[in-house]
Image (tube, rainbow, N blue to C red):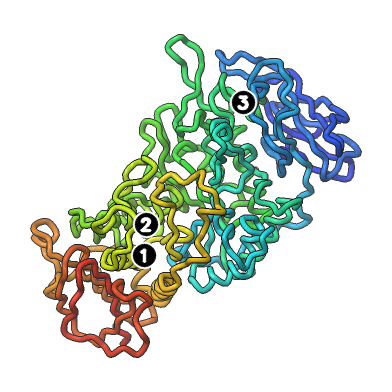
Amino acid sequence: MPAEPSVALGATPGPDGTTFAVTSSVAERIEVCLFDVDGHEADHVDLAPHDGTWSATVAGVGPGTRYGYRVHGPGDPARGHACDPAKLLIDPAARRVAGELTWTPELVAPGVDSAPFVPRSVVVAPPNEPVGRLADPRPWDEVVAYEAHVGHLTARHRLVRREQRGRYAGLGHPAVLDHLRRLGVNAVELLPVQHFVSEEQLVADGRRNVWGYNPLAWGAPHAGYASAGGDPVAELRAAIAAVHEAGLEVWLDVVFNHTCEGSLGSGPILSWRGFDNADAYRLRAAPDGTLVDDDVTGCGNSIDASSPTVRRLIREALARWVTEFGIDGFRFDLAATLLRADDGPQPDAPLLAELAADERLAGVRLVAEPWDTGLGGYAVGGFPPPWREWNDRYRDDVRDLWRGEPVGWSTVATRLVGSADLYGGHRADPTVGVGAIATHDGFTLADLVTYDHPTDGAHGQRSDGAGRDGPTTDPEVVARRRQRQRALLGTMLCSRGVPMINAGDELGRTQGGRADGYTLDPSRWGLPWPEADWDLVAWTATAVDLRRRHQALRHARWVEPGDPTITWLTPAGVPFGDDDWNGASPPGLCALLASPGPDDATVLVLLAPTEAVDFTLPEGRWYRALDAAVARNVAPGEAPVTGSLHLGAGGFVVLVDQH
């Protein structure tokens, strides 16, 4: 019997069997195909349409059943349609995917059965009760995020059992969680765990997509991260529960801007395309009048979030990650695509309003990568509250500062206190910006100070090898590089906004100078636990703890003229004047930060990026809390500093006057 139109999308088991529901505005007939334990098609059932939703409840079908869909309808790519009943389709709302994708012409060729070459959707019983998120989430100004890849995180960790390395189980391993707690981070942002596949060309070259920005199922955990023979749903739930038990939030990097189906006519028909291509993807008219993909992602296709059915799928996927796994937040890859109308990204895009109104997502953290590759796609500052945004200007300007480029102290000061030029005025506070020195995309921190240019021919990274390009054993060069690593980390962790550490940067991880590491094998290029720089780990943990203890470093308020909580001083110890900001810049900058909170401490942040500087200090008993020139950090009990302080070139020091 047909289910009610309001039925949840996907496969939902119940006492009367399993209800299957999908959407299509162009289908003429839709069949759900059921497979037995040997992989043979055991039955197929027609779904009944109602207002664009097709559904049926099939008796005797329960969790573990594998299934797929066949859609009968228009198959004219020139008009934007790609229905083909010969193609077995993954459920766009699948909770689990099983089996491998085999790249073959049958995935594209009209009228040729694709079933032998594609994975299956799997019926999964949702939990009886919603899975809880982390209780009592921290305010944004206390968040220190850690961007990690499930595979790279533990592939080389010797304390993790071999069968769990690079798997969901490794994510929840006590040794990993102990490291994260000692480091002081409190939110783990995972690179995509939505089920993904490797691109055809990569497979042909003997490589694979490691990062996962090529989704096949938005709501299904990637099966490749489950331990051998394991259930990816259960294993990921257990890992998230362990991370929560350690007191850390879990965010997912989600990819809703494109899919793995490539371009219309040449890409495979695997899921969305076969149900309703013209509804799922952005299309434009070619000069000959045919419809082609309007690709604003650089991935062959772009999701059309102006479609109500697409938005419904996105909302359902997000809600299930929250209620069925306990996810605390999401980072949206190329999020500008999701705001697009015909004339570019729109701040009042319907998806934003619908996410804000969805009670299942109340309190969930939302972070945008605020751009895509299309016209007008740079949408920094365009996402309304409560959204946060990756701040690429912060990354670029801080990198330039520490490699000696003429950034200007006015720009540096603006970045240190939250980038009001990008977000101020219409946004609540500086925590709107997520500031990172390095992320998965580009150089690691170690490579940033080691290589002048990427070794893989990728775009420039605003990097500098401190006089040498590439690895060296020269002790002076090595010392300068390590000091710059500490200065970059210290600057980030002493800036207003939300800092994010790229996993492994605290360990000294390298990618051999590669800036585009999406295919790098975790077994070789994963986090370097066996040869980790434990001094850098300790230094980073001290910096994170300093930020935690002193609100002056993370004050969630914009700086106003005459603000008593901050004074910018020249090396001579006098406030910056107009000539200092706009004319010949002094060689160093001193930020005097008064605490707005009960800790009653004043913090002094000193920067001397290019040359040695003697700083005249304000009156007080200053204790050195961080020093980029010291490998493991300042010994406790050091005598106070008064009068003046000499910083060598590349110096970064934080002093604290605890009244």
Q: Give the residue at mark 3.
A: 268
> Crowding at label 2, few (<14), some or many (≥20) Cα neighbours within 10 Å?
many
The numbered dot on residue 489 is 1
Q: Residue furthest front?
A: 473
How far apart in space, not on screen, are marks 1 and 3 (Cα)? 43 Å
Name the amino acid, label 2.
Ile
Q: Which quadrant holds the N terminus?
A: top right
> Does residue 120 show up?
yes
Q: Nearer the viewer, residue 309 or 462?
A: 462
Q: Nearer the viewer, residue 176 or 29?
A: 176
Left or right of 89, for residue 431 = left
The numbered dot on residue 582 is none
Q: Nearer the viewer, residue 121 or 51?
A: 121
| Upstream in sequence: badge 2 or badge 3 | 3
| Upstream in sequence: badge 1 or badge 3 | 3
How far apart in space, not on screen, are marks 1 and 2 (Cα)? 7 Å
How far apart in space, not on screen, are marks 2 and 3 (Cα)? 37 Å
Residue 264 on image: x %, y %: 55, 22
Q: Which quadrant holds the C terminus?
A: bottom left
Q: Residue at x 73, y 52 (%)?
A: 228
Residue 505 on image: x %, y %: 43, 61
Residue contact at pointers 1 and 2, CB within 8 angstroms: yes
Q: Quadrant of residue 371?
A: top left
> Crowding at label 1, few (<14), some or many (≥20) Cα neighbours within 10 Å?
many
Q: Is residue 487 above or below residue 130?
A: below
